[in-house]
Amino acid sequence: MNKNTTNNKTERTQVTVKNVVFCTVILLLFSFGLSSSALAANNSPVVCKANVGRITIEVDPRVELIGIVFRLAGSPEFNDGTLRPYVKAIEKHFGDFDGHPVVKMAAQLRQTRLMSCDGPMSLAIHFDDNFRLRKTDEEWPSTLDYRWEKQETTEFLKKLRQFAAETKFNEFFKAQSGMYEEGIRSCEELMAQVNLEKWLGDFFGVKQYGDLKLVLGFVNGFYNYGRRFADDRTSEKYAIIGMRPFDPANTVIFRPIQLGTTVHEFCHSFVNPVVEKYMDRLQPAGERLFAAHGPVMRMGGYQKWESVMYETATRACVACFARHSFESMYKDYYLKDEVKAGFVWTEDMANFLKKYESNRDKYPTFESFFPEFVDFLNEYTSKTAQ
């Protein structure tokens, strides 16, 4: 997760634009009426998406729907930094539904399950147009956030289906399509200038990495999330990037700063499954770092040492991207911003990953190298975490 505030066409013209965009990235990087009960069939929302290579850029109605519910429930992360015109549209359309059963349940889940931030977003990508959990080959989807328990999830989705029908969510979504498309166009323009899918495949050593989905979250504001969905046929990696105001006019635009955030959130989907396999071995380092930097970590939204481990590995990988893509600005901007965010150890972790990058014959994949990363991090924290 990354909360991004001010911390989360001739050939010659193309080159110039690319250089400007790349430099700006580093400068800023750091720092449903339904007549039925479904979003499906003839009542499904308008499709707002584009493709850049293998990356799909879209506004996902599931993300907007759940975000609106948790916004009505008072969750700060869905009330912070949202574009004013969008806020006014939400208030006008949904203002009379803040006492709806699903809204009350969302507020309750926040109290009883600490359901916040990436928890709601995880469920959003795990249900289908009929508000049922997407089927997997598992009894319960392992990629669904642990805070969602079976009985409560079934109840929540039933109430969510009712909310979508009663509020005519699809009409709202269609009415906002112009705003959504503005965001998608500006995002598409920037993403076309970076071959992110190639870097991800090359760096992590993965040839088959499924579908990459860049979702613009208009309710998410300052907050951004990397989540995954997988079944026996599909593997989807999501970068859910909050669309927030960058100027007093609340211009709907995807800025270079959000390119950096996109790299971060996509990296989570490659990194997190590897970290999960080694979490027991990472516990000493995680506990040391959280004990030494707990207050700063909590302010950043990281409430457990395990979260710090996911972030540590992800940020080290993003640092490698930054170091190779923008070497001249790497130390002046990226690393300074990491320190401001409390991750003072990112540079040392990224430097250690040079061993991986320069020995790809021995370490063909990030996962094949990760045991060494774990040993280094444990040794490092035994000396530096105080």
Image: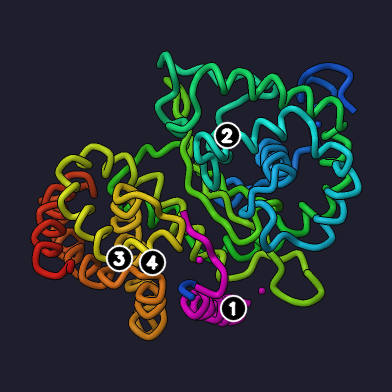
Residue matched to label 1? 17
Magenta segment boundaries in residue numbering: 1-28
Percent position of residue 322, x then y = 37, 71
Element at badge 4? helix
Q: Earlier in the sequence, mark 3 or mark 2?
A: 2
Which residue position is annotated with label 3?
Answer: 293
Residue at x 15%, y 63% (from the top left corner): 381
- Contact between labelled residues 4 and 3, with CB atoms less than 8 Å apart: yes
Instruction: Give me the C-alpha separation between circle 4 and circle 1.
Output: 37 Å
Please state the horizontal and vertical placement of residue 290, each as a whole percent of the image: 28, 58
- Type of amino acid under label 1: Val
The residue under label 2 is which amino acid type? Answer: Leu
Tag 2 or tag 1, which sits nearer the N-term? 1
Residue located at (72% from left, 35% from top): 103
Reading the chain from its start, which is encountered first: label 2 or label 4?
2
Say above or below: 262 vs 147: below
